[in-house]
Image (cartoon, rainbow, N blue to C red):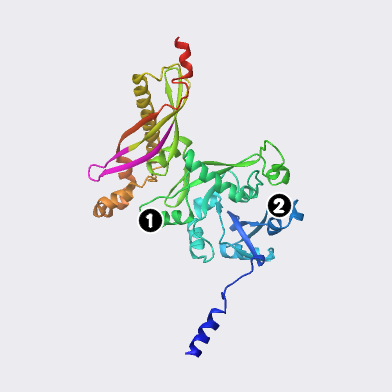
Amino acid sequence: MKKILLLLLILLLTGCYNYRELNDLAIVSAIGIDYKDNNFEVSIQIVNPKKQQDSSSANEPDFIIYKSKAKTLQEAFRNVVDTSPNRIYGSHLEILIISEEIAKNHMDKLFDFFAREPEARSEFNILIAKNSTPNDQISIITPLINLSATNIKTLIETNSQNLATTVKLTFNETFNQYLNPYLEIILPSLELIGEEEKGQEQENIAQTNTNNKVKLSTIAIFKNNKLIGYLSEEESKGLNILLNKANISLISSKYHDNYIVSEIDNIKTKFDIDVYKKEVNITIKGHSIINEVNSNINIKDPKVIDNIDKNIENELKKIIENTIYTTQNTYNSDVIGIRDMFYKKDPNYLKKNYSNWDEIFKQIKFNINIDLKLYEKGNTTGGSLYEKNHY
């Protein structure tokens, strides 16, 4: 009995077999991947440990960018070892930015690499570098938030909670879209404003109004796992609402001589599919709040409130119709996921018509019903400030 207890005690004292010292690791916060001249170009943002621990290194940057290129992604990442003194550690990866070239022609290689990589976490956000390179975007030194990776992640979260003009997706969610033969990929996109060279200098954060920064753009849409275009801001908003990814959104609607801005929340979208009639009934419900009134109206009048309510619903319906038209006719890409709904409703029908889906998708009729409840006028004076013109 004593021998057994001694053996167990020895096993408990052995520690972790794969234990690594933190100081020996290069913590990866962001990765940028491009493809040029038959080579994958990889840029890796590494957190500067000296900056985090030593006050004497105040003038050093918060992160360092290591770059490499090779014929394959595995070789490109391994080549970074030649320049990094520490072992690359990817379990804290926050952001992956890919170029438009990768999004158009190399998504299969990207998914294969990250799906097989044991140390890479699957909950990092993935974006497309629109009209610039991934390296330029992760190299920007940003104010307020030291790491550009954390800055981009925060931008995505803030947008998804307040505007819904882009989409928040992790690698794992995008990979599931890729694996599903009935779904198309969508991704958020990121633009670079200003001059990339100046944005990489420390002086970029020493200004009260920096002109060099990254900005979230609109939703990128795919067809057959290839990037084919971008939606507008309003269409991106409409797609998020259709996909039940918009908690809050702003709607600006024309009313008489000017505009009324309202916030809609608690948005819920439901689909009812009639496979054989090729009809999709969409019901969108939610609440609305009047945020801004730029029109000479009396919002204490119940009839006016009723008209405003209908006006907001009509504006939202127009956004949804334009979004559907663009995906159905301009791109013929089923990013809404109607094919997947058809499959769940009647698998046999879709199996028989799988090869003809592009034609079927163009023929589908969408019936849209909007039901928003205006529950707050959002004023502090009892009515519109413009009402003084009535008296």
In the rendered structure, the answer to whether residue 315 lies left or right of residue 197 reads left
Does residue 41 appear anywhere in the picture?
Answer: no
Residue 79: x and y, percent? 64, 65
Residue 277: x and y, percent? 23, 42
- Asked if residue 275 is among those painted magenta in the image, a careful observer would answer yes
Quarter holding the C terminus? top left
Question: In the figure, 88 relative to 321: above or below?
Answer: below
Q: Residues within 10 Å of mark 1 (few under 14, many from 20)?
A: few
Instruction: Looking at the picture, tell me which residue is in the foreground, 30 or 327.
Output: 30
Give how far apart the Cα atoms at labels 1 and 2 are. 42 Å
**Residue drawn at (74%, 54%), measured in percent from left and top?**
55
First along the sequence among labels 1 and 2:
2
Question: In the figure, 376 relative to 211: above or below?
Answer: above
| Mark 2: secondary structure | loop
**Residue drawn at (48%, 43%), measured in percent from left and top?**
160
Q: Quadrant of residue 369?
A: top left
Which residue does the numbered mark 1 point to in the structure image?
A: 180
Does residue 214 appear anywhere in the picture?
Answer: yes
Give the amino acid type for the residue marked by disc 2 in the picture. Answer: Pro
Residue 333: x and y, percent? 39, 45
Instruction: Looking at the picture, tell me which residue is in the foreground, 280 or 356.
Output: 280
Q: How many marks?
A: 2
Which residue does the numbered mark 2 point to in the structure image?
A: 61
- Asked if residue 118 is among those painted magenta in the image, a careful observer would answer no
Q: Residues within 10 Å of mark 2 (few under 14, many from 20)?
A: some
Give the amino acid type for the residue marked by disc 1 in the picture. Answer: Asn
Most common SS among magenta residues: strand
**Residue drawn at (70%, 58%), measured in percent from left and top?**
53
Q: For the magenta stretch, what is the residue range?
A: 263-283
Q: Nearer the viewer, mark 1 or mark 2?
A: 2
**Residue drawn at (47%, 58%), measured in percent from left and top?**
108
